[in-house]
Amino acid sequence: MDHGKTTLLDFIRKTSVTAKEPGLITQTISTTFIPTTVVTGTCEKLLERFKFSISVPGLLFIDTPGHAAFTTMRQRGGSIADIAVVVVDINEGLMPQTTESIEMLKSFKTPFVIAMNKIDRIYDWSSGKCFIENFSEQYEHVKGEFEKKFYSIVKQITELGLDAERFDRIADFSKKIAIVPISAKTGEGVPDLLTVIAGLSEKFLKNRLITTQEAGGTILEVKEVTGLGTTIDVIVYDGTISKGDFLIIGGKSPVATKIKALLEPQAMKDMRTEKQFVSIDSCSAAIGVKIVATGLKDIVAGLPVRTAKSQHDAESIMKEMKDEASEVEIERKAEGLILRADTVGSLEALIRVFEKYAIRSAKIGNINKNDVINAEANNNPMLKIVIGFNAGISDEAEAIANASKIKIFTSDIIYRLVEDYEKYCENKAEEMRREELRNVTKPGKIKILPGCVFRTSSPAIVGCEVVSGKILPKSPLFKVVNNAPVVVGTIKQIQKEGNDMDEAKIGDKVAVSITGPTVGRQIRESDELYTNIEAEEYKKLKKFEDLLTQNERQTLDEIAGIKKRKNPSWGL
C-alpha cells in the first residue's frame, strides 16, 4: 500500500538541506539519522510552545515495508524499534495491512504514533508548514471535511481497542495514541510529527540509551557488491561495532566470522542505490552500516548479529544464539499446522499470528518432504497444511504434496498467509458440509404428467414435472395413500431431450425411469410423488438447511409433515 511512508522520509531529508545542515544527516541502509540540532532547528517554534527541550542524540528512522518491519526489525522477544510511525492515508483510512501492523505493534508492546498523510488532497485545503498554525486558517467547510475524515479513522482505531486523538488535543500521551496530520508532499505537519516523536522519546525512552561494548543488530539486506563479494546491511541497535571484531550471525546454525570492513554511504545518499562508500573503523548504535566479511554467502535477511572481541566469547555467543533458536521452535505429537520460516524473528512472528490455531511443528528452515508427511498425518483436513514464511520448498516436498493433495502456503507477506489459510478453511468447511449431504436423499416432489407414460414397468418410464425441490437418480419415492406415505420405487435415470441429467429442479419437465412400480397399479398419471427421506437423513438436512434453497426447505417440511402423521416422533 502506498500511504506515503518513503515520501515522508524523502521530505525529512530535504528539510535538513533547507535547514543548512546537510552534513549532519547520515542515511544508511534505508535509514535516516536526524541529529538533535536538526530536529531543534526544524521544530523550534513548537518546542517553545510545548515547553520542552531535547537531550536524546537524535532520531534514526528505518524505512522498511510494513510486512518486513515485524520480522527483520525484531530482536529476541521484542521489537528493535523504540517507537514506530504508522502512515495512514486520511482519504482511505485503515487498510487491512495497516490494521495488521497496528495489531502487531500492540502485541510487541511497541509505542507508536500515527502520521495521517495526504491532508493536502482535501478539497480547498490551503497548505502551510506547521499544522497547528495552518489548521486555524482553513475555511470552515474545509475544517468540517477534515474533521469528518479524521474522526472516521479515529473510529476505526477505536474498534481495534485503542484510544486515539489529534496530538494537540492530548493531555496524557501515555493514555492516548497521538495522530499527527501531515502532507509528505508539501511538508505540512512534518515539524509537528518530529516534535511529537522527539517529545515521546525524551519523556519515555531516554533511559533506554544505555549501550554495551559488544554490538547487537539485525540484518536488513544481503547484497553482492562488485569487488567486495557478499555483504550484509545491518542495523546496529546496541553497542559499538568495530573493524576486526568477531561477527556472530544467529539462527539455527550460527556462523562466526571476522569483520574485514565497515562501510557507510556518502552523506545524504541511499545505500540501496549508492555505489561509493566511506570506510570507517567503528560505529555505535543506533546506526545502519554495510559489513564486509567472509562466509556470508548463505546468510539471509532478518538474522540477528552480535559481536565479540575474542574467539572464546564468540563461541559462547554462538551457543547462546543456537539455544535461542531452539527455544522458539515447536515440536508436538498432537495434531496441528506445520510452520516454517527463515529466521528466529520470522518464526516468532509466524507463531504469533497463528497462535489461535493448533500448531504441531514450527521450525526454522525450508519446507522438506517430512513436513508434508507430518501434515498428511493429521486427521483434521483443516490441519493438513504446511505454511512457509520466507521459506523455500524442496522439489521432493512439492511432489509429495501434489500427490497426497496436501496444501502448502508460502509468502513473504505474513498477513497474506493468514488470509490464504482462513479462506482455505472457509472453503474447505463448505466443501465438507456439502460432502456430508452428498449421499443424502434431497427433498423433492414430482407430478406424473397425463399422457406421458412411455413404459409401464421394468422400469416404468414417465414424463414428470418437478413441482418443488429437486430430484436425483437413486432417490427413493413415496406417494400418499390414505393419508400415509407408501414407498413406490426408486428413480433410476433422469433425461431431458434424450440427455441424461444429474438432477432436475423445480419447474423442469423430464422423463424419469422408476424401478419397482407398474403404471396403473402402484402409480398412475397425475400422481404426486415425494422423495422418501429417512429420519436420519432429515436430521442432517435440518442441520445443514442453510445449504438448501427456500423452496427445498419448504419441500422438506412438507415431507416431514406427511411422515409425522403416521409417526409423530419421526425425525426427532
Image (cartoon, helix red, strand yellow):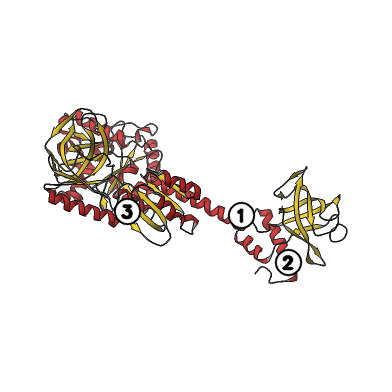
The answer to whether residue 21 shows anywhere in this view is no
Q: Nearer the viewer, residue 156 or 207?
A: 207
**Can you identify the residue that label 1 sits on?**
547
Relative image position of residue 483 (x, y in whole percent): 80, 67
Q: Quadrant of the N terminus?
A: top left
Disc marking residue 563: 2
The amino acid at mark 3 is Ser
Q: Secondary structure at mark 2?
A: helix
Q: Secondary structure at mark 3?
A: helix
**Can you identify the residue that label 3 sits on?**
107
Disc marking residue 52: none
* Residue 129, above or below 79: above
Is disc 3 surrounded by few (<14), some (14 to 19) or many (20+) residues within 10 Å? few
The earlier-in-sequence mark between 2 and 3 is 3
Relative image position of residue 83 (x, y in whole percent): 25, 46
Q: In the image, which is nearer the foreground, mark 3 or mark 1?
A: 1
